[in-house]
Image (cartoon, rainbow, N blue to C red):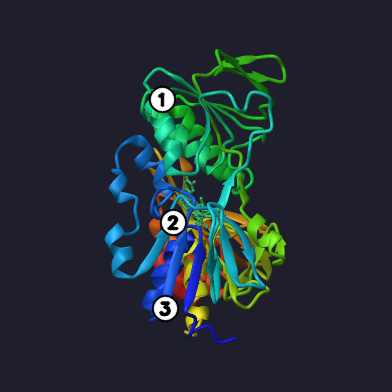
Amino acid sequence: MDLSRSENIVVIGAGQAGAQAIASLRQFGYEGHITLVGDETALPYQRPPLSKAYMKGELGEDRLYFKPASWYEDQKVETLLSQRVEAIDRSAREVRLEHGGCLPYDALIIATGSRPRALPVEGATLQNVFDLRGLSDVEHIQPRMIPGKKLVIIGAGYIGLEAAAVASQLGLKVTVLEMAERVLERVTSPVISTFYQDLHAEHGVDIRLGARLKSLKGADGKVSHAVMADGEEIEADIVLTGIGIVPNIELAHDAGLACGNGICVDEDARTNDPRVFAAGDCTLRPLAHYARTGRLESVHNAIEQGKLAAAAIVGKPRPTIDCPWFWSDQYDIKLQIAGLSMGHDQIIVRGDPAEKKFAAFYLKAGRLIAADAVNSAPEFIVSKKLIMSGAVVAPDRLGDTSISMKEIAAEAA
Ligand SMILES: Cc1cc2nc3c(=O)[nH]c(=O)nc-3n(C[C@H](O)[C@H](O)[C@H](O)COP(=O)(O)OP(=O)(O)OC[C@H]3O[C@@H](n4cnc5c(N)ncnc54)[C@H](O)[C@@H]3O)c2cc1C
């Protein structure tokens, strides 16, 4: 279907993927009308700093925005903020807005992202219990991050651990409750988990593994304690939950679009309706290099799919699909992750975790499929290339720090 002559393109969701799709549509020469509908009050902004430099007060709000308001005016993009799309009517080819009115579309991009998983325990709605997804969450959390206050974080995923690092550096007393037997269990290997457990312990963060939270207890409507299954009560002035996200697929699902654990899209970010695309956290996408589909929760994925959708609509060649990647900043440690480690059968560690500079490489049948690089940019950069080339790498060479990553890349080529 030729959508390049579309008069109206509607983008639902003013986040990372929506902003990228718009920028790419204009960059690829689309001159028609674009409407961006977002249910937050702000123009599209970056979320990663919300649990890092912005939460710590080291980055001004103005630095979060991808583009200033004038850019949207210059590019003739109509922005409808604080507006929720309530429904998509595919037969009428229009979206219905919560506050009334409909927007017609010739092509539609759904970029609705995801939302924090709700904490399924009694007391989760007490005051001073927060999750962390948007700017407005930080607006509530930040004024309460006062030195000496007790913060309990539920969930030792990346967001929980990043917030723990910020809070402990700001002088709060931080306890992290993690149900699993190690931190970051869902996303990484024991060597990386142990490294982060030790790192947080060095900074005075109390990480409780195998923790069974029973409920949150309050006084005067405000949270006061986390109550554990064994009866222990942990004092809390603030509770932050970080127990994963849920993709916002309801609009797509209700409109009859194919969904699984995400909105199903093809390599061009197209849904099973040729006029409707989806990009970012909300999608279940092909991961051709890994011969499977999956949902990726990352900036890189949102940017890549935003570009893919725009290119497909405008009729440009499909942009290159890159190795999936992610990062996390905790204290002065930068973790860069290349690829997806699921299904690995071998782990090679290069360098010494005690020196806070090392990498874990994940291999499957002799091929590199992922790498976690701690303060090790060359390992990350070379891994991205090796992963996508599918080169066979010699495990003993990868683990030998006397051989540079450049040499390893040359040998594998
Ligand atoms: C605190 C935090 C730290 C992170 N750190 C990193 C990191 O270090 N590295 C990394 O790669 N990724 C990180 N991420 C993840 C990354 O930010 C997301 O993967 C990325 O924002 C996804 O982009 P998106 O456009 O799919 O969703 P979002 O950026 O969430 O945008 C979706 C938008 O759609 C809106 N919306 C939803 N439904 C509707 C509707 N019906 N009508 C109108 N609007 C709607 C939402 O409110 C939201 O504004 C982090 C995320 C968070 C929250």
Relative vertical location of residue 199 with respect to residue 266 in this rendering, above or below: above
Relative vertical location of residue 345 with respect to residue 236 in this rendering, above or below: below
Is residue 377 something that shows in the picture?
Answer: yes
Residue picked out by circle 2: 401
Asked if disc 1 is less than 8 Å from ligand 1, the answer is no
Q: Residue at x 56, y 52 (%)?
A: 98
Q: Residue at x 47, y 43 (%)?
A: 353
Distance in Å between CA atoms under marks 1 and 2: 45 Å
Q: Residue at x 52, y 43 (%)?
A: 158
Q: Which of the numbered marks, if any, corresponds to residue 32? A: 3
Asked if disc 3 is less than 8 Å from ligand 1, the answer is no
Number of other residues with Cα within 10 Å of mark 3, as a class: few under 14, some 14 to 19, many 20 or more: some
Nearer-N-terminus badge (1/2): 1
> Tag 1's secondary structure?
helix
Number of other residues with Cα within 10 Å of mark 2, as a class: few under 14, some 14 to 19, many 20 or more: few
Relative to residue 32, is residue 10 drawn left or right?
right
**How many numbered marks are there?**
3
Relative to residue 114, is residue 384 drawn left or right?
left
Residue 52 appears at what percent x and percent y?
Answer: 40, 41
Amino acid type, callout 1: Arg
**In the depicted view, which residue is nearer to us: 34 or 215?**
34
Relative vertical location of residue 190 with respect to residue 271 in this rendering, above or below: above
Amino acid type, callout 3: Gly
Q: Which of the numbered marks, if any, corresponds to residue 144? A: 1
Nearer-N-terminus badge (2/3): 3
Tell me the quarter of the image containing the N terminus: bottom right
**Contact? badges 1 and 2 (CB < 8 Å):** no
Amino acid type, callout 2: Thr
Figure quadrant of residue 92: bottom right
